[in-house]
Image (cartoon, grey):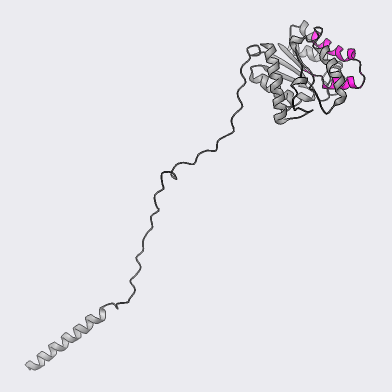
């Protein structure tokens, strides 16, 4: 009986060893993959800066106030060279406003001094005399007349110089009798219109005479034309307007 008990104990021990051995993992068994969470690398100091805003184009230098123009009501008479804000005359009006003037524009395509005074085109609101009366009654202080291109065309078409100058003289006389300060700007020089060349000096000499504007109240646009051509816009018109403005306010100062 004692021997049986000993044998039974050995048997139970052997079975226990077998059970333990079966529960061990094989040496080459794959270990379960440990799930990890990747953290992003911190941004470097250079990449953490906010994106810089694109630099804008430098603004044009502001026009200095012109004491003579500040608060003055200016009536601006022109032809197609002033019809619209991108024309040379339109750019000149912009500069006058920046200098302090209150500007009203009366510009019309194909206008000459003769057609303005006679009111001879359908687009003219009235005869020139009546248009000027309305502007005078509205409190005009200064009148700037930028005409001459179509008047050169008239001279080239054999219109006498005296007939060309007559409406200019009538306009200036009416305005000055009403106490308005009148300034004239002549026609540009057009390389593409050589038929105008023989008449440019005649028109300029007549307009700057004391019976019309007078040399001290007249800007000859011919030498200031530069690279401008008829009806040019953009930077070409802007540069031309800048030269006209500088010449005009130099005389006004």
Name the image quarter holding residue 251: top right
Instruction: Indicate the position of residue 47 as horizontal and vertical percent values.
Output: 45, 45
Instruction: Indicate the position of residue 159 as horizontal and vertical percent values.
Output: 91, 18
Q: Residue at x 70, y 16 (%)?
A: 247
Q: Is residue 95 left or right of residue 148?
A: left
Q: Which residues are magenta?
A: 146-173
Pick whichever, 113 or 63, lies toward us: 63
Pick whichever, 219 or 69, lies toward us: 219
Q: Is residue 51 left or right of residue 14?
A: right
In which quadrant of the rendered image does the C terminus lie?
Answer: top right
Instruction: Indicate the position of residue 194 as horizontal and vertical percent values.
Output: 86, 26
What is the number of callouts on the image?
A: 0
- Residue 140 appears in the picture as rendered: no
Pick whichever, 225 or 3, lies toward us: 225
Q: Residue at x 72, y 12 (%)?
A: 142
Name the image quarter holding residue 125: top right
- Residue 217 appears in the picture as rendered: yes
Instruction: Indicate the position of residue 220 as horizontal and vertical percent values.
Output: 77, 17
Check residue 156 for magenta coloring. Answer: yes
The majority secondary structure of the magenta stretch comes to helix
Q: Residue at x 78, y 28 (%)?
A: 229
């Amino acid at each position: 009986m004692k021997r049986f008990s000993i044998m039974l104990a050995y048997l139970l021990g052997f079975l226990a060893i077998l059970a333990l051995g079966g529960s061990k993992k094989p040496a080459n068994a794959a270990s379960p993959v440990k799930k990890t969470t990747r953290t992003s690398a911190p941004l470097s100091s250079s990449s953490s800066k906010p994106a810089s805003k694109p630099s804008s184009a430098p603004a044009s230098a502001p026009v200095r106030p012109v004491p003579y123009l500040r608060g003055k009501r200016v009536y601006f008479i022109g032809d197609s060279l002033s019809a619209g804000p991108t024309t040379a005359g339109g750019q000149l009006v912009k500069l006058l406003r920046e200098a302090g003037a209150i500007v009203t524009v009366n510009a019309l395509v194909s206008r000459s001094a003769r057609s303005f005074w006679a009111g001879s085109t359908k687009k003219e609101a009235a005869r020139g005399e009546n248009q000027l009366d309305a502007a005078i009654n509205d409190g005009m202080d200064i009148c700037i007349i930028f005409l001459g291109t179509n008047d050169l065309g008239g001279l080239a078409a054999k219109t006498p110089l005296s007939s060309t100058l007559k409406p200019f003289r009538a306009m200036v006389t009416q305005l000055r009798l009403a106490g308005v300060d009148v300034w004239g700007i002549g026609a540009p020089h057009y390389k593409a219109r050589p038929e105008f060349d023989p008449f440019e000096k005649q028109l300029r000499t007549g307009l700057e005479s004391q019976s019309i504007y007078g040399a001290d109240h007249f800007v000859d646009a011919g030498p200031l034309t530069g690279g401008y051509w008829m009806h040019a816009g953009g930077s070409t018109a802007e540069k031309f307007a800048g030269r006209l403005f500088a010449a005009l306010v130099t005389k006004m100062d």
